[in-house]
Amino acid sequence: MTTAGIDMGARNIKVVILKDNKILSKGIALSGFDQKASAEKAFNETLTKAGLSHDDIKRIVATGAGKDVAPYANSEISMMGADALGGAYLFPSARTVIDVGAEEGRAVKCDDKGKMIDFVINERCAAGAGTFVEAMSRALEVKLEEMGPLSLKAEKAVPMNAQCTIFAESEVVSLIHAKTPKADISKAIHDAIADRIASMTRRLGIQRDVILVGGVAKNVGFIESLKGALGVDLLVPDDPEFVGAIGAALAPAK
Amino acid sequence: MEQRLFEKFHEWYENRHEYAKGWKERTGGKALGYFCTYAPEEIIYAAGVLPVRILGSHEAQSFTEPHIFAMFCPLCRDCLAQGLQGRYDYLNGIMIAQCCLHMRQAFTSWQKHIPQEYSYYLYMPHGIQTPRAYPYLRGELEDFKKSLEEWTGREITNKDLDHAIEVYNENRRLMKQVYSFRREKTPRLTGLEAMEMVVSSQMVDKEEHNQALKKLLKELPNRKLNRSTGTRLMVLGSEDDDVEFLSMVESLDATFVIEDHCTGSRYFWNEVIPQEDRLAAIAARYIDRPACPSKDWPKRTRLPHILKLAKDYDVEGAILIQQKFCDPHELDIPAIRSHLETNGIPTYFLEFDVTVPVGQFKTRVEAFLETFQLPTDLF
Amino acid sequence: MAENKYETKPLDCWNEAKQLRKDYYENFARARKNGGIRWAGGAWSFSAVPAGLGDDVYSLTGEPYGATVAFNKEFAEECHEAAEAKGYARDLCAYMRNYWGSILLDKFAWGGEWPKPDFLWTTHICCSHAKWYQVASELEGNVPFFCVDVSVGPYNERSERKLNYMVSQMMDGIEWMEKVTGREYDDEKLIQAVYNECRATSLWAEICTLNKTIPTPLDEKTMYSLYVLGTLMKHRKECADFYEKLRDEVKDRVANKIAAVGNERFRVMTDTQPPWAFLELWRYLQKYGVVSIGSLYTFGLIGIFEVKEDGTWGPRTTPQEQGIEIETREEALKTLAEWTLSRPEWQHFYSPELKSEMMKRIVKEWQVDGVMLHYNRGCEGLTIGIAENKLALKEAGIPVMHFEGNMGDEREFDLERTKAEVDAFLEILGAR
């Protein structure tokens, strides 16, 4: 059976096509202002890549913040439910799936079948993890993709308050004024977000294996910081931003 | 040379846990952690138990989120985080004298999740302005005393209480004497030093603290601080033992000459006035002390008290600080600001978190201080 | 979408509840014109006490008023901005800011100017209570203000001393009221008001208990419009009489299997005040056959319960049912103090565990499938300990979620985000 998952994320739209639970193709597009149009484009490109036509797809399941406007979808699943399914598909040992994206951090507890048992979403003050790193990379005049590697070069852990991102931002400015090395600031930023995500995950209880997914999981600096904050090892899949879409494609019919 | 006068207090403040562990080893006694300065320490001390105030460590942490919803103040979360990380594992028990909702959560979560042999919730009244509170608290103190006796297996005699009252009153008198040196034109101590002196008194054996104070008082009259006093500031609001903030401000040609904090004058300002019924005397002391905002109603007794402090200590300006989400202080700050400003004392407001953005606060405080330095007859 | 299984129909006495509420606010606004007295205070104030000043004494309770403002998003925002402009922080109690904002704007939510009360009479258990009216008094030009401290600990630790502390303050309060109003106090009216209050609050508990049935005869959204009468005038005869009528009607619904929601498949309970401007969330649940049977909040804010012989929760037996005759002012006040200390929503102020136990009891006896906790940024008093409640419910194996919001400040509620969380929870329950 061939199914598709569309993850309508805040920053990017991700599409995955599965045949008999094997990934055929993946596609990604910026969400932009017209999410629906972007999703149509991403979906059709992914179809083409798989060499399939729309009629070949038995079921299309939407997830993500914009799932209500997803095109073609005939079913939907919550982001947390999709994380659990996608996470367990990639790592059958996964019991906790942490998803950190542009606007939101989530953690899901699941069983060995990828069924969600419990979940938690970050509090509003801690929103915007991915977007925050992006804004801070501009403040430091560092390319976004260099933030992670830079942070690994830090020599010192600079404590930063992580209560809310707005407040944290002003602390970064203070650190810049105090001539703190860029590497240390970069680590401080990742530590701060990691602390928030770790706090949130502790509300669930940390059950191993823990896997990290979502766009921010591509940032090695953040991965290191989160490992430190949680005190456990993390499994990170390739293409971690596609896990939600994979989970959607695996979702049962309703 | 001049720094060393306060070195002992600084050491105690920095090494509070080592001190308490050492005290226990030395004396074989028990240590009881308390969560708010309404705790009737005299009774604890009379039981031969060391009262230790539980405070935070000003570090970002990720342990308390499962226990306390994030809209409660950073201090209560910071305190609980200390317990969850085992930093107070030497405590034999904990107690709280009923205070704000925020701190109560640190206490109840601690009670539930951190093993201890003893815990006690003292129903300290909020209605401290009604005369009915005196007999009521006296009775509640009696229950607390009995409970301590059961726990320690030792009777608390009148003699024990008298001794504790005397030690505590002496501590209050001595610290007030030290504070008088802040009233001078050139204060002989900084606000940071005063804070460390007061907060250390909340953690160490008061008799030992008294010895250190007496030594200090011998030398203090001759001390000359090698710094400019600058603008004479008052700081007031929520709990504040933020070393980084205090030293930042005092590096900007300004000195904190007085404060109204539970980590400062509010803690020790009044004494127990002895009477035959010792518990009644102790109850009266805690009811009559400078109020925490959560108990300061229907009248606002804090306004005249704070203004008097400002006048006595010749304050030029006041910084009001508040722990983020601290409702009791949020409910008082507008009234205090307006009262001080009507009486010619400019104010500046800052919101604190577990750590503070020092750089940003520096810019603001500098601007506030400039307003005192600009010539007023320019135009 | 879940299909209808049960018969359903609106409540016959619905309009009467609406009318009582409308009259309450209008009577307050008009009281002075007719030579009457008006006082304001919290919904938990000892409202039976001012009743001794006469039959023409009307009250305005602050929390229901704050909720009334919250329904009107534009007015609520105006109120919040007015309070913030005065220097009051935006994370303070949202009802309180709605209330102060109304004074500052000189606008009454029910139309016209702010009806300034003759005196303020309240109780203090939450840190904001006395401070609320301290500030209100200042904003209204020093309206006389009296507050009874009731923070004496949970019911299971009650003692003569604690009761005396409360009673003696109320005795002082009566003398103060006489001075402030120049009226002579009538103990007989106080005694009647105490009887009324015990009857009304026990009846409300009985009504809540009827929700143990499947299908539930009342859903929480409907209950919000009914329990409110207890928050306005729990001491008045018309409140107790109405609850009696309502009790009979709900009993009738139970007997005839009339459901609140025809498609009931899953039963949930919530916690704390809802985000008033977003009750559509409760409708959203109903689309999936999920009905909220109530909460410790809707039950125990006003309702007074006791553990019955079979170990389950039921309405507390009133003094009159026990044949107790109250004869003096002091007896009346003591009865009232003792009765009130057993209020379920007063227990958690001292220990989250007491609340967790009550919540687990409701889950069991009311046959609840899952719990949805509102982490309410607008009320620190009812949110205290809520994270520990969540842990305790989880530990007991009960499915539980929380959503963040604010009962009275819509700027802090994100409906779409909340729906996303609810969707995931419904998936866990199997309702989606």
Image: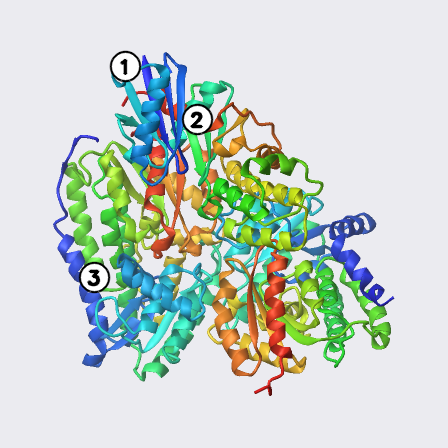
Q: Kindly identify the amino acid type of the residue bearing the numbered disc 1.
A: Asp
Q: How packed is label 2: few (under 14 Cα within 10 Å), some, or many (20 or more)?
A: many
Q: How packed is label 1: few (under 14 Cα within 10 Å), some, or many (20 or more)?
A: few
On the same chain: label 1 and label 3? no
The structure residue drawn at horizontal position 28% and vertical position 26%, both measured from the top left corner, is: A75
Question: Quarter of the image containing the C terminus of chain A?
Answer: top left
**Mark 1 — residue?**
A56
Q: Kindly identify the amino acid type of the residue bearing the numbered disc 3.
A: Arg
Q: Is residue B150 visible?
A: yes
**Mark 2 — residue?**
A242
**Distance between the Cα atoms at labels 1 and 3?**
60 Å
**Tag 2 subunit:** A
Q: Is residue C199 visible?
A: no
The quadrant where residue B34 appears: bottom right
The structure residue drawn at horizontal position 51% and vertical position 36%, both measured from the top left corner, is: A201
Q: Kindly identify the amino acid type of the residue bearing the numbered disc 2.
A: Phe
**Mark 3 — residue?**
C21
**Tag 1 subunit:** A
Q: Position of residue B282 (x, y in %)?
A: 64, 68
Q: Position of residue C120 (x, y in %)?
A: 36, 73
| Position of A103 relative to C91 (above/below) | above
Tell me the element at label 1.
helix
| Position of C209 relative to C47 (above/below) | above
Depth order, front residue of A38/B126 = A38
Q: Where is residue B94 in the image (x, y as percent from the top left)?
A: 63, 51
**Tag 3 subunit:** C
On the picture, is C359 further left or further right than B254? Answer: left
The mark tally for this picture is 3
Q: Position of residue B232 (x, y in %)?
A: 67, 76
